[in-house]
Image (tube, rainbow, N blue to C red):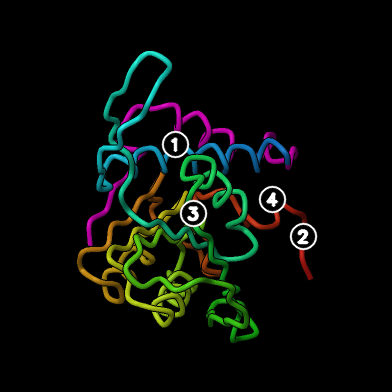
């Protein structure tokens, strides 16, 4: 699996990440969602450089010219609910892509909230067969929900290529993917943090992305 860590570059994404992590900025949910979306747009642009292209002849008022357009049949999938603004950022760039949605969420399996399991109960997706599948989810902590989404989507058909995109990853999640996805998969991260705490949250991270985007849940 190829891993691309955007934080290793000097780009404007670092400004968005700084604001996402800052407790004072997190009080504004609109700003938080907008930054998640903007990172999605930036990451989608970088990913677009790796796709296949085919020239199309365009007629202007004064002539014609050939312009290379994306050849890949794209399917953008996300994990509910935290992935929604990230997904929207990708769709702003890949506006002709189809969409898929998977409900996959963590559940603590012990009283101390130190062990987690993953539960999936809903999916709305077209077939992934032959498509370039891009799975977007802001947080890659244990990697369990991402692997669950990946496996669920592959049951709809075998994609030609898979990209996985996250805002923040933990090394444990990266390793989980290495062990469970195809070798030619590419993982895109805006940052890879040092690890997780005892409750399986990424540290330093920025907290619970879904709660920060949409409010606390029961």
Q: Based on the displayed image, in which of its 4 quarters is residue 133 positioned?
A: bottom left
* Residue at image mark 4: 212
SS at mark 3 in the image: strand
Q: Is residue 20 magenta?
A: yes
* Residue at image mark 3: 203
Mark 1 or 2, closer to the camera: 1
Compared to residue 59, the image places residue 108 above or below, namely: below
Q: Are marks 4 and 3 in contact (CB under 8 Å)?
A: no
Give the spatial CA distance, label 1 vs label 3.
23 Å
SS at mark 2 in the image: loop
- Few, some or many C-alpha atoms within 10 Å of disc 1 (few <14, some 14-19, many ≥20)? some
Give the spatial CA distance, label 1 vs label 4.
21 Å
Mark 1 or 3, closer to the camera: 1
Residue 79: % across, % down: 56, 65
Give the spatial CA distance, label 1 vs label 2.
28 Å
Q: Are marks 1 and 3 in contact (CB under 8 Å)?
A: no
Residue sticking out furthest to the top: 62
Residue 192: % across, % down: 38, 50
Task: Evaluate whether residue 105 shows in this view.
Answer: no
Looking at the image, residue 81 sits to the left or right of residue 146; the answer is: right
- Few, some or many C-alpha atoms within 10 Å of disc 3 (few <14, some 14-19, many ≥20)? some
* Residue at image mark 2: 216
Q: Residue at x 38, y 27 (%)?
A: 11
Q: Residue at x 45, y 69 (%)?
A: 146
Residue sticking out furthest to the bottom: 110
SS at mark 1 in the image: helix
Give the spatial CA distance, label 3 vs label 2.
20 Å
Residue 49 versus residue 95: which sits nearer the camera?
95
Task: Evaluate whether residue 119 shows in this view.
Answer: yes
| Magenta-tinted stretch | 1-29
Looking at the image, residue 100 sits to the left or right of residue 153; the answer is: right
């Amino acid at each position: 699996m190829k891993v691309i860590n955007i934080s290793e570059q000097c780009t404007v994404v670092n400004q968005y990440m700084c604001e996402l992590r800052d407790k004072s900025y997190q009080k504004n949910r609109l700003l938080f969602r907008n930054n998640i979306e903007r990172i999605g747009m930036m990451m989608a642009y970088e990913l677009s450089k790796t796709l296949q292209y085919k020239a199309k002849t365009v007629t202007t008022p004064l002539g014609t010219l050939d312009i290379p357009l994306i050849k890949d049949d794209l399917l953008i999938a996300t994990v509910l609910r935290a992935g929604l603004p990230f997904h929207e950022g990708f769709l702003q760039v890949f506006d002709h892509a189809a969409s898929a949605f998977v409900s996959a969420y963590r559940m603590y399996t012990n009283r101390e909230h130190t062990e987690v399991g993953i539960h999936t109960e809903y999916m709305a997706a077209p077939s992934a067969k032959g498509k370039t599948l891009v799975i977007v989810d802001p947080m890659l902590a244990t990697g369990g929900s991402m692997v669950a989404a990946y496996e669920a989507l592959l049951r709809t058909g075998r994609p030609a290529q898979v990209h996985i995109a996250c805002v923040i990853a933990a090394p444990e999640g990266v390793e989980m993917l290495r062990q469970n996805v195809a070798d030619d998969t590419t993982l895109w991260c805006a940052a890879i943090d040092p690890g997780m705490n005892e409750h399986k949250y990424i540290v330093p991270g920025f907290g619970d992305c879904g709660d920060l985007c949409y409010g606390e849940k029961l």
